Image (cartoon, rainbow, N blue to C red):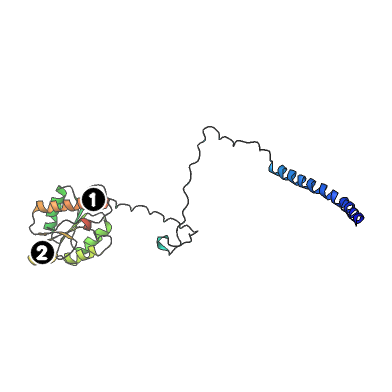
């Protein structure tokens, strides 16, 4: 029994001795390997390149905010739109109506030569250019040929086309709807009818007061010139009728 124990001890010693030697060596090798991985030499620091002299750093740009999708007011749509709507082109400002140079032109429509002569003398003496016609048809032809006419003075009783028809045609046309009109009449009943017509800026009964009529013509000429320079209509700043 004792001899058998000695044989087993010798047999185990022959096998255990290499194991006892190899295990510690393996542990040492593993520890050395881990230590080697943990040690890393520091890299050499390379400073960034310096900007050239006189260079200004770019200012930080604000973040771009995409508009919401169409049809989602108030930006309630959680998904921002990737489409940016093109800005609406700005329209150029409307050019003011050209104001002709020289003295203003006044058109007189009356079938009476005496009335036309008196008005012509009064207005030309105040520096106006005067155009005279006999009825409403001739007045419309002159307005087509001379769009720069500033004021129309018309009688209410004329052949072919009377003053009422002339006023209706003038203010029914796009080219002359803003033309100030002064009516003259010798009848009280016609005076009352004219007061109901829009676009008449003065009603004078024959015989009229030259001073009052001239003041009314001058005020209308200045009013229309100022409205033309501002691109407005005379009816927007209409003075009270006489």
Residue 183 or residue 86, whichever sits in front: 86
Residue 228 or residue 20, whichever sits in front: 20
Mark yes or no: residue 188 visible: yes
Q: Residue at x 12, y 67 (%)?
A: 193
Q: Position of residue 190 (x, y in %)?
A: 11, 66
Question: Is residue 222 shown left or right of residue 84?
Answer: left
Say what secondary structure mark 2 lies in.
Answer: helix
How many discs mark residues in the rendered view? 2
Q: Residue furthest front?
A: 2
Mark yes or no: residue 162 visible: no
Question: Which quadrant holds residue 172?
Answer: bottom left
Dot 1 and dot 2 residues touching (CB under 8 Å) = no
Question: Which quadrant holds residue 177?
Answer: bottom left
- Dot label at residue 55: none
Q: Position of residue 52 (x, y in %)?
A: 55, 33
Of callouts 1 and 2, which one flags the residue occurring earlier in the amino acid sequence? 2
Q: Position of residue 135 (x, y in %)?
A: 18, 63
- Dot label at residue 191: 2
Question: Is residue 50 shown left or right of residue 4?
Answer: left
Residue 84 or residue 222, whichever sits in front: 84
Residue 229 or residue 63, whichever sits in front: 63
Mark in front: 1 vs 2: 1
Say what secondary structure mark 1 lies in.
Answer: helix
Q: Residue at x 8, y 67 (%)?
A: 189
Q: Residues within 10 Å of mark 2 (few under 14, many from 20)?
A: some
Q: Look at the image and tell me in which quarter the N terminus lies.
A: bottom right
Q: Residue tagged by mark 1?
A: 226
Q: CA distance from mark 1 to mark 2?
A: 29 Å
Q: Look at the image and tell me in which quarter the C terminus lies.
A: bottom left
Question: Which quadrant holds residue 5?
Answer: bottom right
Q: Residues within 10 Å of mark 1 (few under 14, many from 20)?
A: some
Q: Is residue 54 above or below residue 207?
A: above
């Amino acid at each position: 029994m004792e001899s058998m124990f000695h044989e087993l001890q010798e047999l185990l010693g022959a096998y255990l001795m290499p194991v006892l030697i190899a295990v510690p060596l393996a542990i040492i090798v593993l520890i050395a390997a881990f230590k080697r991985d943990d040690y890393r030499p520091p890299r050499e620091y390379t400073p960034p390149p310096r900007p050239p002299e006189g260079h200004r750093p770019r200012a930080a740009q604000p973040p771009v905010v995409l508009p919401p999708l169409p049809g989602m007011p108030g930006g309630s749509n959680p998904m921002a739109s990737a489409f940016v709507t093109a800005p609406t082109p700005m329209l150029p400002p409307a050019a003011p109506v050209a104001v002709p140079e020289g003295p203003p032109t006044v058109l007189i429509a009356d079938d009476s030569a005496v009335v036309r002569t008196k008005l012509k003398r009064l207005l030309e003496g105040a520096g106006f250019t005067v155009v005279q016609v006999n009825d409403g048809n001739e007045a419309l032809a002159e307005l087509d040929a001379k769009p720069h006419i500033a004021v129309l003075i018309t009688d209410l009783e004329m052949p072919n086309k009377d003053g009422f028809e002339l006023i209706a045609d003038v203010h029914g046309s796009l080219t002359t709807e803003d033309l100030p009109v002064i009516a003259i009449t010798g009848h009280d009943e016609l005076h009352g009818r004219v007061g109901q017509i829009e676009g008449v800026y003065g009603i004078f009964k024959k015989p009229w007061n030259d001073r009052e009529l001239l003041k009314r013509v001058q005020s209308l000429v200045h009013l229309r010139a100022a409205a033309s320079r501002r691109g407005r209509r005379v009816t927007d700043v209409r003075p009270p009728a006489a």
